[in-house]
Amino acid sequence: MLLDNKTIVRRLYEEVWNRRRLDVVDEPISPSHALNEPIVSGSQIGPELYKRRVVELTTSFPDLRFTIEDMVTEKGKVVVSWIISGTLPATGSKIFLAGFTIHHITNGKILDSHPRCDALRLLRQLADVSPLRPAAASAS
C-alpha cells in the first residue's frame, strides 16, 4: 500500500530529522533523489548523501528540530513550509529559521527536493552579523 504524499513527507521530517532515524531515509527517498540546495556545493544524489546532510546538520545543532507550519499538495508535488530551531553548542546561540521545500514524489518516493531559506538570516544569527549599512562618504 502506497502512502499519500503528505504522509510520506511528514514522515521524512518527523522520523528522519526530528527523531534522527537514518534507517528510515531509504523508504521515502528515491535512489536517484536530488537535493537541490543552493547554499551547499557539490552533488547531493541519493539516500546516502541525504543521510550525510542530516548527520552534518544534527551534529552542528544536536537539538535541531523541524516544525511543519503548512503543507500544500498538487499532483506529484508537496510544498512544506517549516521552521528550523536549534542551538549551536559551542556558543549556545539559538537559531530560528523559516523556509520551505518543494518535494517531487512519484510512486511513493521523493525524487527531488528544493529547499529554500534566508541563508543571510542564519549567518546573522550564528555570527551576530549586523545588517549591511551604507558605507560612509569618503573625504576628498
Image (spheres, rainbow, N blue to C red):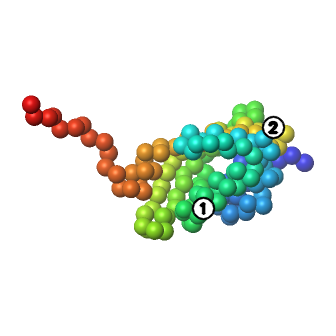
**Residue, x 42% and y 57% (percent of image)?**
126
From what the image shows, is residue 99 above or below residue 84?
above
On residue 18, the disc is none
Residue 14: image quadrant is bottom right
**Callout in the foreground (1, 2):** 1
Give the Cα distance between marks 1 and 2.
28 Å
Residue 56 placed where, x, y %? 60, 58
Residue 121 placed where, x, y %? 42, 47
Q: Which residue ends up furthest to the right in the rendered image?
A: 1
**Residue, x 56% and y 39% (percent of image)?**
38
**Residue, x 75% and y 32% (percent of image)?**
75
Please rate how many residues cluster around mark 2, counting C-alpha atoms within 10 Å: few if below 14, some from 14 to 19, many from 20: few
From what the image shows, is residue 46 above or below residue 90?
above
Residue 52 placed where, x, y %? 67, 55
Q: Report whether residue 4 is seen.
A: no
Q: Is residue 107 left or right of residue 80?
A: right
Residue 36: image quadrant is top right
Dot 1 amino acid type:
Thr
**Residue, x 35% and y 56% (percent of image)?**
128
What is the secondary structure assignment of the residue under circle 2? strand
In what quadrant of the picture does the C terminus appear? top left
Residue highlighted by disc 1: 58
Q: Nearer the viewer, residue 93 or 107?
A: 93
Q: Earlier in the sequence, mark 1 or mark 2?
A: 1
On residue 106, the disc is 2
Residue 44 placed where, x, y %? 68, 44
